[in-house]
Amino acid sequence: MQIKPVKPAPMQLDLFGMVSDPRYVNLIPFYEALPRTVPGSGWAASIKRNADGTIAPKKRSFMYDKKQYSLMMSPAYIEDANGKLEAHFP
């Protein structure tokens, strides 16, 4: 059986790339296209802080399937051995 895209896909499911077989979606390639890390070189200077000193979320843009998307990436808060929380981007 060959899986074919459903046309037109419902707008709310457009990101998931619905196909003719409901057991399959194209979510993995979309997820893999997301910029999930912050490269070290040059990024430290671009990290902004909130008024309380915490690290502000970072907005990233990327292309997928010839469409422009943006995402807001928030830092993870990791507790050190002394119980202090530190914000880190992956």
Image (cartoon, rainbow, N blue to C red):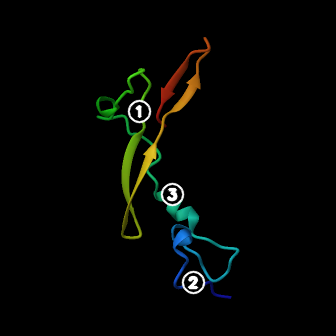
Query: Residue pushed farthest bottom?
Result: 1
Residue 3 location in percent, x, y? 62, 84
Mark 1 is surrounded, within 10 Å at the Cα level, by few (under 14), some (14 to 19) or many (20 or more) other residues, namely some
Q: Is residue 12 above or below residue 70?
A: below
Q: CA distance from mark 2 to mark 3?
A: 22 Å
Mark 3 or mark 1, which has the lower sequence index?
3
Task: Pick whichever, 49 or 17, lies toward us.
Answer: 49
Label 1, on which residue?
A: 56
Report if the CB atoms under discs 3 and 1 are less than 8 Å apart: no
Q: Which mark is residue 6?
A: 2
Instruction: Name which residue lies at 57% across and 26% down.
Output: 78
Label 3 or label 1, whichever lies nearer to me, is 1
- Tell me what residue is drawn at x 49 percent, y 34 percent: 75
Q: Tell which circle, 2 or 1, labels the residue nearer the N-terminal end.
A: 2
The residue that disc 3 covers is 32
Could you say whether the residue bearing mark 1 is in a helix, strand or loop?
loop
- Which of the two discs, 2 and 1, sits closer to the camera? 1
- Secondary element at tag 2: loop
The residue type indicated by label 3 comes to Glu
Q: Amino acid at mark 2?
A: Val
* N-term mark: 2 or 3: 2
Picture residue at 54% right of the left edge, 79% below the top: 9
Q: Residue at x 36, y 70 (%)?
A: 66
At label 3, counting other C-alpha atoms closer than 10 Å, the crowd grade (few under 14, some 14-19, many 20 or more) is few
Disc 2 vs disc 3: which is toward the camera?
A: 2
| In the depicted structure, whether residue 54 falls above or below residue 42 | above
* Label 2 neighbour load within 10 Å: few <14, some 14-19, many 20+: few
Residue 58, image quadrant: top left
Q: Is residue 48 above or below residue 83?
A: below
Q: Amino acid at mark 1?
A: Ala
View extreme (top): residue: 82
